[in-house]
Amino acid sequence: MQTTDNKPVKIVADILLIHNNRVLLCKYKDANKYDHQQGWFIPDDLVKYGEHPGDAARRILNEQMSYITANLSPGFVESFIGNDGSWHLIFHYWQKVDALPEIMPTGEISEYKWFERFGLPADSDIAHRGWARYTIEKIFGNF
């Protein structure tokens, strides 16, 4: 997607699953698809043309984790210029789960793990220099 001044645009949705004080993070096999970043991510993907960001968050859980949900809560929206010069518009969603859901990662995921909110990996082990930590803290601060 391009802006009117021909700058690239990336519209992204992510979904944070929360069980008590634990959050689900994943690692992707293909770093090229994720801005050449490696490390732990909140499950995310680009929003498809014409797709509502909430529907994208549901799709992400289904496609990447084989988990189907209807109950999402909007978190917040971010807007910034990425390292590649593209404009990023990020829609963050979250869902609390009463029991640990059965997660079956698909071919895109190399690993997933539940982390304690205050026991997250070091920023150097989280993609985008610890960006998930900021997102998690902001979402937890909203409820």
Image (cartoon, grey):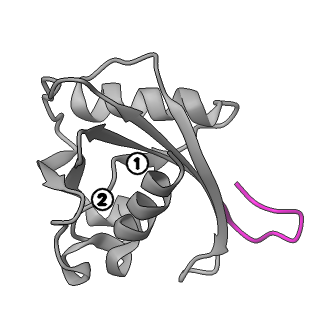
Q: Name the residue rendered at 40%, 33% in the picture.
A: 95
Write the start and end of the magenta stretch as one range: 1-11
Quadrant assignment for the N terminus: bottom right
- Give the image quarter of residue 49: top right
Q: Amino acid at mark 2?
A: Phe
Asked whether, in this view, residue 72 is left or right of residue 132, the answer is right
Name the residue that disc number 1 marks.
Answer: 44
Q: Position of residue 16 (x, y in %)?
A: 37, 44
Which quadrant of the figure has residue 84?
Answer: bottom right
Residue 93 in percent (x, y) is at: 50, 41
Three-letter code, disc 1: Asp
Residue 115: quarter of image: bottom left
Mark 2 residue crowding within 10 angstroms, few (<14) / some (14–19) / many (20+): many
Q: Is residue 45 above or below residue 49?
A: below
Question: What is the crowding at mark 1: few (fewer than 14 residues within 10 Å), some, or many (at least 20)?
Answer: many
Magenta span dominant secondary structure:
loop
Question: At numbered mark 1, what does the secondary structure look like: helix, strand or loop?
Answer: strand
Separation of residues labelled 1 and 2 (CA atoms):
8 Å
Residue 41 against residue 14 in the figure, above or below = below
Can residue 37 be seen in the rendering of this structure? no
Indicate whether residue 9 is drawn in magenta. yes
Q: Please state which of residues 113 and 12 is positioned toward the viewer in this rendering.
A: 113
The residue sitting at 33% across, 18% down in the picture is 68
Q: Would you say the residues marked 1 and 2 are in contact, meaning their CB atoms lie under 8 Å apart?
A: yes
Q: Is residue 31 visible?
A: yes
Numbered mark located on residue 5 in the image: none
Image position, residue 85 (x, y; %): 63, 80
- Say whether residue 70 is left or right of residue 67: right
Which label was assigned to residue 41?
2
Question: On the rendered structure, is 67 left or right of 86?
Answer: left
The residue positioned 23% from the left and 32% from the top of the image is: 65
Nearest the eye: 107 or 143: 143
